[in-house]
Image (cartoon, helix red, strand yellow):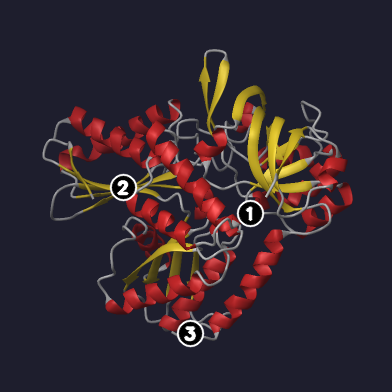
Amino acid sequence: MDNSKLMNSILLLLEKTSTVLSDDVYKALSEARLREQENSVAQETLSIILESAKCSGESGIPICQDTGSLFVIIRACPSEQVFFIEKAIKKALKNLTERGVLRQNCVDSITDKNTGDNIGEHVPQIHFIPWQGPTRISVMFKGGGSENMSTQYSLPHSELKAGRDLDGVRKCILDAVFKAQGKGCAPGILGICIGGDRSSGMLISKEMLLQRIDTVNESPVLAKLEDTILEQANSLDIGPMGLGGKTTLLGIRIGTAGRHPASFFVTVSYSCWATRRSVVELDDEGGIAQWL
Amino acid sequence: MAVKKITSPFSPDIARHLSTGDRVSISGKIITARDQVHKYLACGGKSPLDLTGMVIYHCGPVAVREGNQWRIIAAGPTTSIREEPYESTLIRTFRPGAIMGKGGMGEETRQTLRSEGCVYLHLTGGAASYIARSILHVHEVHFLDFGQPEAMWVLEVKDLPALVTMDSQGRSLHTEIENNSLKRFQQLLDNPF
């Protein structure tokens, strides 16, 4: 790969992710707007959201002032590019922070000092995954308000009367949606992991948010569970920004992982309507071959 | 519905005439304050300017320095409930006209809004470009050592649209919606997959 081409690809990828709302999310918001009652607060809120997102995309302004924390997954990275790609991501973060495409969003947890450039201890979070196929980079800028709403349940859960089955999973997810009202910016998108351990559950549920919401789950059981939860969550009348209405969730993607016989975790990653994520495939020279 | 025009700072008398559900449009001078400024002010810190009647906005903007001036690029609201431990003290000590943010606040703030004649204004979270259009310029910035998002930005705004969701009569739209959704949630728990 050509390093300068790779650098340009990463800069473009991150800048576009912060400023242009993914077309599947924009479409889901537009459809939601049509479903809400005429002149309701819900419809007005969705109109503001759509107008703001459109304006951001057209003028290169961040979609949300909380430009999030960067989460990156790189599949099939050529071994000789591993160190360069990490450096290139950090360089791009510095550049975009200076230009106001990103807010200064990394704080030292002991001193409370903002590092000023979105780089810090274990920040950004980059995962390299062995994979057969072309190099694929997935990125997400995850907002703090929505990340605060992500959570993990251990089944059985007596308060929710949730057992170790799919109905127990359903109850946990609805509980997370109920508790996120007024905090994460609804209508949200959920990434779910059923199973795994404490750490893999968190990682896999976050990875589920990288998937488009206009595709259907390959597992018919999970597809049905997703539809049921989407319908039930949207009947809670929490609505856009928690001000009432028919649209509380835009989408939900459920994944699974094997579990220890003693453990049954349900992990919920909550993402706000301003879900900023992109997936690209690189060509052999490091240019962007396609946006997925 | 008619939009009520308000200029910040304003008197508690104006706040007392606002009700939950009212659409307002804010002009004038407002300040931003997030977690660090709230903690500082609630723990006895001095405000660098008089906050009487002012709108305190829960917001950490994206700002860039251009020559001697700051320019606000994006400035949507942050989650207000994080400031719940401090807000009542701030309202009693500094007498702001309104608190502005997203998602509403808790029981203590609801009571303080009522006793002190203050209101809570709601903005659409994430609508960063839309809101930034109403910000004319930065008057001054304090506490930059808290970090750019946590600093106190003194902003001039014009026709910034907001919704009253907690008023000085003790009503909270957020509590009403939460109570309704709780009933529905409990029904759904008994509705197996």
Residue A52 on image: x %, y %: 48, 41
Task: Look at label 3 and name its amino acid.
Answer: Gly
Q: Is residue A274 visible?
A: yes
Q: Which residue is mark 2?
A: A278
Task: Look at label 1 and name its amino acid.
Answer: Gly
Residue B57 is left or right of residue A196, and the answer is right
Do labels 1 and 2 touch, CB within 8 Å? no
Label 1 Cα neighbours within 10 Å, binned few <14 / some 14-19 / many ≥20: many
Q: Kindly report the distance in space between the C-alpha atoms of the residues bearing marks 1 and 2.
A: 28 Å
- Which of B13 and B66 lies nearest the eye of the viewer? B13
Q: Residue at x 62, y 32 (%)?
A: B146
How many numbered tags mark residues here? 3
Q: Is residue A107 visible?
A: no
Same chain for mark 1 and mark 2? The answer is no
Q: Which residue is mark 3?
A: A163
Residue A75 on image: x %, y %: 22, 51
